[in-house]
Every structure is written in structure tokens, then in C-alpha cells.
Image (cartoon, grey):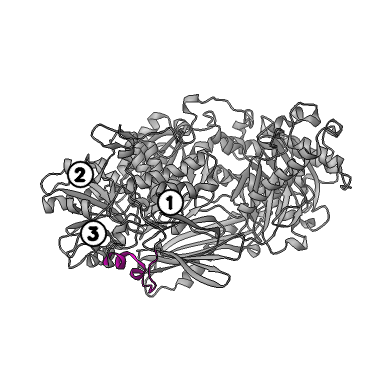
Amino acid sequence: MVNQKLLIGVDVGGTNTDSVLINPLALDTSNRGVLSWNKSATTADVSDGIQKAIRSLLTDCPEVAKNEIASVTIGTTHFINAVIEQDAAKLEKVAVLRLSTNYSKYAPPFSDFPGGLRSVMEGYTAIIKGGHRIDGTEVQPLDERSVREHALKIRDLGINSIVINGQFAPMYHDHEQRAAEIVRSVLPKANIVLSSTISTIGFIEREDASIINASIMSFARKIILSFKNAIRHIGLECPLLLTQNDGTVVSTAEAMKTPVKTFSSGATNSMRGAAILCAEEDWAKGQSIIVADIGGTTTDVGLLLPSGFPRQSSAYSFIAGVRTNFSMPHVESIGLGGGSIVKIAKDLTIGPESTGANLLTEGLVFGGKTTTATDLTVAIGLEDETIEDKSIFQVGDGQKVVGKFSEDVKQAFKQEVKEMLENAIDRMKTSPEPIPVLLVGGGSMIAPQELDGASKVFRPPFFGVVNAIGAAVGKISATVQAIKRMEPSDDKDALLEQLKLQAVEKAVAKGAIRDSLVYDDIVVNPIPYVPNTIEFMVKVIGEVDYQAMHYSVPDEGDSEFEESGGSVAKHSETSANYIEHHLKFDVRAYRPFINSEKEWILSEIDCEFLRIGTYILGCGGGGTPYHHYLALRHMVRAGKPVKVIRAQDFPKYQKGDGAVVAVGYAGSPTVGLEQLSGDEMVHGYNLVKRFSNITPQASLPWEIGGGNGLTGLKIAADLGIPCVDADFMGRAYPLLWQMIPVCYSEQPCFPPCALADGNGTTMLLSEAASDVIVEKVFRAALSEIGAHCGMVSFMTAEDISQRSIHNTTSLAWKIGRAVHTARQNSEVQNCAEYIIEACGGPETAKKIFTGKIIRVDRRLFKGHVYGEIDVKDENSDAVMTIPFKNENIYCELDENGSKKITASVPDLISVNDAETGEALGTQDYRYGLHVFVLVISPSTRWTDTAEALRTGGPSSFGYDFGYTPIGTYVKPHSVIEEYMS
């Protein structure tokens, strides 16, 4: 038998199918090992198209025997396209069984799905007793009887795709696995997806990815089996592999179980192929490279790391509008491609409209009547006498455009293309230093050979089929994750070595060559508020052992799909009433509803504004509002009135001396991502109510910043009372006693108060010597009851009128509206100015810096995350350092060797993502993010007295410098007053 050594890569796109036959032992030669390549239109039956493409490759190389082919690797966009198109013929209804006891009830399954996709996928949901805490203890034993009862209901509904999502299942699998056994006994042929096999910590996001995976599984199986049948019909007996989002490959068996992990393989294949094509260039070795993949409609810009793999996105990525938390390539997309329509008027514009696949009939060089980027490029290339090699411009009939455009038009076109690419590349760079830029894709001919910020612009050979090359030369990866509670005798380094070994063995079992494996990523992070508990993650990558992989001989049962083939034509049309991806509204025309009682009744739009605004007021802390936003929106959708009142109107609701329930979560942000809110606040409320014999008439949050800013609204809706437009911080602070009532009272403010875990444990602290003691007692208890609990206290009417910060809900709303207004006006680049205006103008708030995060440092001390970031101005050497303790503390500017503190607490310091205008929590900080730093003046309640300044100023964090205000505080205007008729 001939030694197998040649590889075939196929990239099946929506428009074209690219294929390549490559010799991996000749990648360092001038032809990069490419023996033949083919580009053809994607067929409705992908099996037929793949057969034709591969047969063409082999026909071009008659000297190659079929048994010399070591593998066929395929990348496809058909799975993600089915989701984006919401094609009910390819997507199945999904049943979701949550094992989370009482947690997550306010953010039920599918709650953050766009309406159209939800109508296609949602089949059945249930929340069942079970799940774990972060330390591995059970929240409740798994209710096996309930699992079986729900499985029977699912069977009666005819649903065949089921997701089982257990709280902390990525760390502790037993409840998910036992539940799957029970469901399998009732539905033996069902597609059962365990969330722990899909993604990591992040309950909603992991569940969402699992739902999409379950819904697409049957269609994916059909398509993958059609791939296998195509290989069989050609007579190839070699492994068939599929490419994943992270640039590695998986067997067909694994891909059929987790097709969602292949959704974004197109962009990854392009960058992996680019790495292969430039690997032997001296200038490319050992450094990062920008890859610009220019197609017919869009340009995707990514960063290729020295490892040969693309930089991945931050914690969250979106699939068809659904938020998920698995790794995707970090790609910037712009509306620029070979088919982009060029409009020649007073100002020349390019795209985003495009002829797309119709370029071959609509473009001028093809006899059409539409001016495209290809037409201008061909004209410029053929007319420019300084360009010697004009082969790249031999597209269509170039004579149809020669002499058609004036010099002014051609120069304007070249400048516009250059600026569009430079801006996209700049957003992807992690340093202001020049970086090599690699141009690939069928439309890359439109790009100039020189770009500002590029040390070199390079268009490699075979640039048009680079994604097929990336697919052909794949690697195997494996990841092991664990959260471990360390005993004093435990050796952290020894445990890490064990996990490394597990990752290696896992990769070898998947088909990697042991000696080729390298560690791609190692994470060792302590968990805040959870003593001696550490999160570990190890990822390894290695070469494929093709001899060890399974051949593509059809499995038993494959033949059932053979006749139907692999059709990807859209077979269903979703009603236009359901085609919805985002909440759409006219920001400028929207008016909140204020009733005749001067009560503000929240809508979904109001919830969205508050989600954005509270995070900006969080100053990096307070936890993400996202899951609280989902819960609040769910209440609004369910018809629960969520009412907000002015502080001065509270006496209308007051009974006796008056009381207000103040609420907020305390604990680990990491735990909060997985253990979603349940009835903690209500349990705490009931205990304090029984003890004090007081019934509050309204609510408010401890802090308006971050996720806690929405908690007052949630308990108000639960109890049927209004929430006061106020809070006790005007922001977020890391310590419970850093509140205005503490600054203006000689007696403890919190007791009697309660701490509740939402699972039957509720503690009451009836008395305390000081509010600092309350903090210490509750922090100590946190680690024993889940590390994420609700805290409840009853405050007085006097606290509301004299010792709270008024109209902070209104301020958060106005900030969120400002961000949406900037987006609607296509002025996200000026988002800071919109926010500043919402805060009271430039005398109240200021944008003090813009740049890119170039350093992130974190450490854990006494439950709090300490650290600092460096943000570098990209137009100078200026650097701003921002230390944080859960929240941002101060800003120090280093300019021309001179350091100066430009802002500090109690000023509100918000680091915002320049691409969206939204806030970054300190846990979101990562290298390379473009940000702007916004500083907002605090309420005068923080600056009127020395005690208030000691409580919330620099000295409260251990610093000895004084406080210099950034501006003058302006009390936010009440939304109720502004919009009541």
C-alpha cells in the first residue's frame, strides 16, 4: 500500500466551494505544496458539489493515487446559515431541562433568543431540583422522578432534541449524566445534549449554545453523512474531518454531536490558511499578522497569532443574535468586497450594498450596468503604467471600463478603499507599531499594496482558496477545565500538572500525535469570595495522526441518508411576523409611559436602556447587569407592572413611619454567572419582615451600578410595590458600608438585615456594633452558602429623603438612551459625547482618555479582585494606568515621563468599549481592547462632609493623595418629571 501523505481541504461556502490538494511535506516550496486547486459555485446538493470539486482536483493530478490521500477536511457555513435563516425545515424544536432547583427561574430558557428563532426552536422547558454549588456540594439531590415525568411529556409532544443544563455542570457532571440516562430510557433515539459538553461557566450562554446545537443536530448529521457518502462514491478510504471555530479539526462522529463548534470555521480556515502560506517568509516568523479576507460583499479582518491560530473573541460571541460563551475568532467585518456597489456623486461611496454572487452578471466588466469595486479596480490596474504585472486585473472584459472613470473618481476610490481597510485593521491591532498585513480572498485585488500602519502588505499565492488550504492542514485540540478547592496540604503546581496530563491524553484519544502536542493556553484564576478555590484551564494543540483516525467508510445506518443527499436549499419560510433579531425602535421618538399617579411603568425598551446605563455607573464593578436584565424583561413580558416613583412622592405610599426594602447581591461575580438569581431577595425580605413586624411600602437598590442596579426593580415587581428612583451610592463600591447612610449616621444603618442563599438558608443579623461588622459577618458566611447571596435591609423614610442619591435610575436610563441614540445616528465614535450630555454636560462629565488596553494585571485579596490596567494613546506615548478593587479607583496619566493623577474616587470612572459605547467590567478587561475613559462627577452627598469623603474617597482604599473633583455635580432630571403629561 502506498504511504498516505496528501491532504484535501474543502471549504463549502454559501456562494463558492473551494478545494485544494496539498502535500504537507512541501509547504516550504514555492508552490506551498499545492498540487491542484478548484473554485466552483456551491450546489444545492453539497454532496454533489464536493464530489465534483474533489474529482476535479484528482483529474488535474492524474499521477496521484486515491490511496495517497491521507484525509479530507471540510469546513462549511451551512449549519450557521440554517440558524441565521431560521429555516424550520432544518431546525428542530428543543426541550430544555434545567437542573438548578429554584435558581434561574426569572430568566427561563429561550428568554434571550430573538423572537423569530425562539418561535422555531422552543418546544418545552422545565426547571428541576438538582445542580451544584461552586464547591461541588449539591444544591438539592437530583429529582429523578421529576426528570422522568418531564421526559414522558416531551415524548408525548413528539420532541426529539433535548438539552440538559445543570448548574455548575462543567465542573460537576453527575447530575447531567444521570438525567440523560433517565431521559434515554424514555426516548432511546433522542438527540440529547449535555451542556457540559458544549461550553464552560456561564449558565445562560452555555444553555443557549446547547439549544442551538440540539436544534441543528439532525440536519448536521444529514449533511455530514452526505459528505461521507461523497467521499465514498469517489473511492477515497481516508479519514473525513471537519474544521472547528478555533482552527482545529474533529472527526465526523464528534462533529455530529457538537455541530455548533463548527459554525465559525470559515473565518478560522481563512486565517489558518494564511498562516500556512506565509510561514516560510522571514518577515512573518514569530510575530502576529493581520489577515484581511476580502470576499464579494464583506471584508473580514482578523489577527493571526504567532501560534498560527487566530485570536479568539472575548468572553461572549453571538450566533444569529443569541449570546453564547464559547470561543470564536475575533473578526472585524466591514461592507467592502469585490461586488460592493460604488456610487459616484458629490462624495464617492463604496457599499455596504453589494451585487454579491450576481457580480458575474451585474458588474460592468461582465456586461452589466452596476458599477462595482471590481470595475474601478480593473480600470485602475489596466490604466496604471507603473504596474507591470497586470494578471490580477484580467477579470471579465477590462476594455469595458478602460477610460470610463476620471482621475478624480479613481483617486477618490483608492483613498476610500484604503481608509476603510486601515480603519478595520487599526481596530484589530494590539499595538500602534506597524504590523504585516496579509490580503486573501477572491476580492483582495481591490486592496492597495500600501496601507498606513502596515509594515508590509502581502498577497500570497493561492490567495483565492486560502480557506480550503486552512481546512486541509488542520490540528487537533483538547481542553480540560476544573474548579478545585485547595486544602492546605494540596500542591497547586502538582494539580496543574495532572490536568496537563489529562489534556494530553484527551487530545491523543481524539487523534493527535503525542509528541507534537503543545500547550496553547493555561489559566489559573482564584475565585473571588470562595476561599482556597481556584479555576484551572489547560488547552493543548497538536498534529493529526491520520492513521489513527477512523476511515470514512459509512457507519451502519448511513445509507438512509444517501438518497436524500445533502440538500441545503431553504425549504421553509418563516412568517415575517417572527423575523426579529433585535429590539427595534426609534430612540428619538420613544417616550416612557408615566401614568396619572406619576408612576413610571417600565417597558422592554426602558429595561434595555437601564441595562447599559447601570453598567456604566458601575465603574467596572457591580457585576454584569445582563442576567438581571433578562429577568426584569421577563417580568415585563409576563405582565408584571414594574413601577418607579420619585423620592419626593414616597410619602403618598408611606404607612406609619414608612419603610423601604433595600436590596443587593454580595459575593463572587464568577458564581453569579452560573448561579442565576432565584428568590433570595424575597426570602430575605420575609425574614426581616417577620422579625421587625414592618411591611415596606417601596424598594430601592443598595447601588445603582452594575447588576445590583436592577435588583430594586425586580423585588418591587415581585412584591407589587414601587421602586424609588434613588440608591445609596450613585455608583458601585466594593464594600457594603461604602454607602451614604453610613456617612451620615452615628448608629449602624443595616441591622436588622438578612442574607439569603435562595435555597433555604436565610440568616438574620438583628444587631451589630457597626456596619463594618455587618460586612465582615456576611462576607464570612458567603463562602459557606454558595458565595453569591442576596442581602436585604429595611430603611426609613428619612433615609430616602435625606440619605440617598435621587434620580439615579433616571440617570442610568438617560445614559442607556444616549448610547442607543449614538448608534441610531451612526455616531458610535462620538458615544462618549452623547453620554456626557446625558450626565449633565461637559462641566459634569468628561472623556479624559482614549486608547488601547496594553496591560492587564489581576490578583485576589480578601475576596476582592485587585489589579490595574494600562491604556495607551495610539497617537502618542501617553499611557493611563487605572488601578481597581472590583471598581476603578483612580486614573494616573504618564505623559512625556511626567505622571499625574487626573481622576479618583468618589468620581465615577468608567472604562468603555469604543466599538459599542458600553461599559467594561473589571472582569472584562483584556489586552487589545479599544476603550475610552469617562469620568462623571459624584453626588455632592459624597463630597459635602469629611466623613463622606473618607468613606468613598482615595483614603478608603488606602491611598494618601487628596481628591480633586473632575467637575461639578448636576442632579439628574427625573424621567417622570420630563415625560409626565
Range of the magenta residues? 947-964
Judging from the image, what secondary structure is the residue with disc 2 in? helix
491 horizontally vs 453: left or right: left
Q: Where is residue 387 in the image (x, y as percent from the top left)?
A: 86, 47
The kind of residue tagged 3 is: Pro
Res. 464 visible in picture: no
- Seen from the viewer's position, the closer of residues 859 and 809 is 809
- Seen from the viewer's position, the closer of residues 742 and 396 is 742
The label number, if any, that marks residue 650 in the structure image: 2
The kind of residue tagged 2 is: Phe
10 Å crowding of disc 1: few (<14), some (14-19), many (20+): many
Q: Whole-Å distance between the Cαs marked 2 and 1?
A: 38 Å
Name above or below for residue 139 compared with residue 643. Answer: below
Q: Mark 1 or 3, which is nearer the eye?
A: 3
- Please name the residue shown 63% across and 43% down the image: 334
300 horizontally vs 765: left or right: right
Q: Mark 1 points at which residue?
A: 202
The kind of residue tagged 1 is: Gly
Q: Mark 3 points at which residue?
A: 741
Q: Whole-Å distance between the Cαs marked 2 and 3?
A: 18 Å
Q: Earlier in the sequence, mark 2 or mark 1?
A: 1
Res. 895 visible in picture: yes
Label pair 1/3, CB-CB below 8 angstroms: no
Q: Which quadrant: the C terminus?
A: top left
Q: Does the magenta stretch include residue 544?
A: no
Judging from the image, what secondary structure is the residue with disc 3 in? helix
177 horizontally vs 897: left or right: left
